[in-house]
Each structure stands twice: as C-alpha cells, then as structure tokens.
Amino acid sequence: MADVATTFLHDQLVDRRQKLAAVLNWQPQEAHLVRLLNDVDAALARMDQGTYGICELCHEPVEASRLIADPLTRYCLDHLSAAERSALEYDLEAAAGLQRGLLPPAETHHDGWEVAHRYRPLGAVSGDYCDLVADEAPERGLFFFLGDVSGKGVAASMLTAQLHAIFGSLVARRLGVAPLMNEASHVFGRSSLSPFFATLVGGRADAGGALEVANAGHCPPLLIRGGAVTRIEPSGVPLGIAGNGDYRVEQLQLGPGDVLLIYTDGLTEASNAADEEYGEDRVIDSIRTGIPASARDAVSTLLQGLEQFLGTAGPSDDLTVMAIRRSA
Ligand SMILES: [Zn+2]
C-alpha cells in the first residue's frame, strides 16, 4: 500500500486507541470496549510486524478502500464470513441508493435547453459524477458537471458525493465557471486522500443559448453543430491535482438543434471480445449518421453504437453519457 495511506491508517488507529483508552478510564468494565482496544492494539502490532493489510486466510492484500473505511479489516473480500458479507451487501445497497438519489432527473428541460443522461455503474456504485445545478438567480442559467473519480467502488463513490456537495455550494456562491472550477479543485484536493483526483467537464448554459465549458483533464466532449463534430480539448489538469488549475473556459453559442455530448471513458475504453477498444473515432462515426432529434435521442444513439460494437462483451468500467441540446 502507498506510504501515505499507511501513515493515514496508522494515525487513525493511534487516534482510536487514545479515545478508547480515555473512555475505559471511566468505564473499565465495558467488555466490548476492552475487546475493541485489543483489536486496535493487534492491528498496530501487525503494522510493526509488516503483516498489516494482508488477508489472514489467503495472504493476499486486503482492498485499500476497505481498510480506509475500516482499519481493523483482517480479511479480503473473498474471505469474509457470511454475516460480514451480508452486512457489506446491505451497506453497498444503501450506498447505491444514496448515489442514485444525488443524480439529476434522466431528462431536464430548462430555459430552451434539454439535458438527458444515462448513468451506468459497473457494480453497485459508480466513480462517475453527473450533476445539474440550476442557479437560484435565473439569469445565471443551468450548471452541468460530468466527471470520473480515480479508482473504483465505494471509496470513489464517496468522493462523487463530495463533488456533488462542493459544486452545489460553489454554484450558490455565484462564481463564474473558471473560478468555480479552480475553487472546486482546491477544495477537492484538500479534503480527499492524496491518491484520488477527478477528471471533469463543468460548464454553464444560459437562456440566450450561450454555453461555457471547461475541461479538467477529461476526455473531450463533442459538439455537434450543423452536422460538424468538434472536440473540446482539456484546458487544465484534473481536479485535486496539486496547484491552481487555471481553467480556460470555452465560450460557445448554440443554435436550435446543436448538441454537446459529454461522456466518461467507460464509453471510449470499452473493449469487445477481440479486445479492440471502441475509441473516440467510432464514437464520432456513430453520431455523424444523423442530427439527433432530442437530447435523449443523442444519448441513445451513442449507447446503441457502443452496444453494437461490444456484441457479447460486457462493460468493464462505469459509464455515463450526457447530452445538452439547444431546443429553442
Ligand atoms: Zn483472502
């Protein structure tokens, strides 16, 4: 495990030990607290011996995200007891429900814009972040965000919830797109464990058809305008990577029928049975065939192209697709 995570876990255990010892000073008879203290001491001893984070049954490493969630974990996912397994499944289902609850509606109509998205986690929860925030001041329009947190599973999904909170509060502070992205990068970097970062496209669509887009190290969104397809290149590093992002904002004016497509790399990096990657060229080909009649139509076209290519092969990553279409 990375040193930074080991240091973090060691500090967590020492902190937990101090708190337990303080409580036991007052309540020395609490048997379950004594047991917990023994478990913490045993974990600290395993750290000293260099066996911490190794499954006690198969001697393979325990998943880092599970150790971060519970530093006392002693078994890998494959070797949990039946009770532990069902508790974990229950937790996962609850986390998945929470994550679904943070998603915008599948279709949104706002000030002459139509937005549709499809959110497909690989497992119960996803490391993809998909969000729409309408500013309380109507002239500020609709903010949209689509991103991908590094890593997978529960740890990544927790960070998507964090992005949701960060962007919700920054939009409420009435920031423009560039300062909003800079501030989000700063806050995200400060508050998440250092191996994590997020690639992300963020922007704003106003009632007059103006669209502002910033791309923080994410795969390029595609603008379909009058049959031509343009890529919107990254204009800064992923969120949470050290330093000020200084994001350049692309200023666009969309007319009726123009569409911006944003997706995560679960689309372009999906592979078929012959181990060929779908790739951006095939994505662009799939949308050249016709101008989408609605945002939902654009999302369906993208996903149909992918499904035809994949054939019998299943997905191998979280996948999210969002279409923002000027309807009026
Ligand atoms: Zn194991």
Image: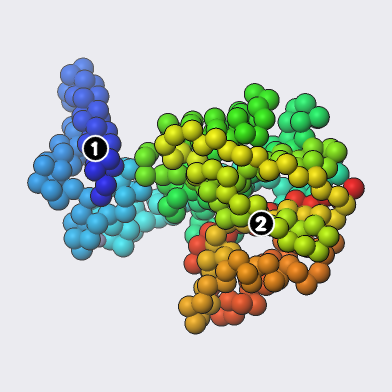
Q: Amino acid at mark 1?
A: Thr
Mark 1 CB lies closer than 8 A to ligand 1: no
Is 161 on the left or on the right of 150, as rendered? Answer: right
Give x and y (percent) for residue 1.
Answer: 25, 50
Identified at 73% across, 61% down, the residue is 229
> Which residue corresponds to mark 1?
7
Between 60 and 220, which is closer to the camera in this rendering? 220
Label 2 belongs to which residue? 231
Q: Position of residue 268 (x, y in %)?
A: 57, 65
Q: How many marks?
A: 2
User: Please, what is the three-letter code of the amino acid marked with disc 2?
Assistant: Arg
Disc 2, SS: strand
Dot placed on the residue nearer the N-terminal end, 1 or 2: 1
- SS class of the residue under badge 1? helix
Residue at 55 percent of width and 60 percent of height: 265
Cβ atoms at labels 1 and 2 below 8 Å apart = no
Hey, which residue is sitting farthest left in the picture? Answer: 49
Which x, y percent locates residue 217? 53, 48
Name the spot of residue 240 as percent of width and height, x first: 46, 39
Depth check, front residue: 174 or 316: 174
The outermost residue toward the bottom is 274
Left or right: 48 as drawn, with respect to 88: left
C-alpha gap between disc 1 and disc 2: 42 Å
Above or below, 124 against 243 in this view is below
Q: Nearer the viewer, residue 300 or 277?
A: 277
When the figure is inspected, residue 317 is found, relative to residue 260, above or below; the finding is: below
Query: Is 2 situated above or below 187?
Result: below
The reply to whether residue 27 is in sight is: no
Answer left or right for 65 relative to 327: left
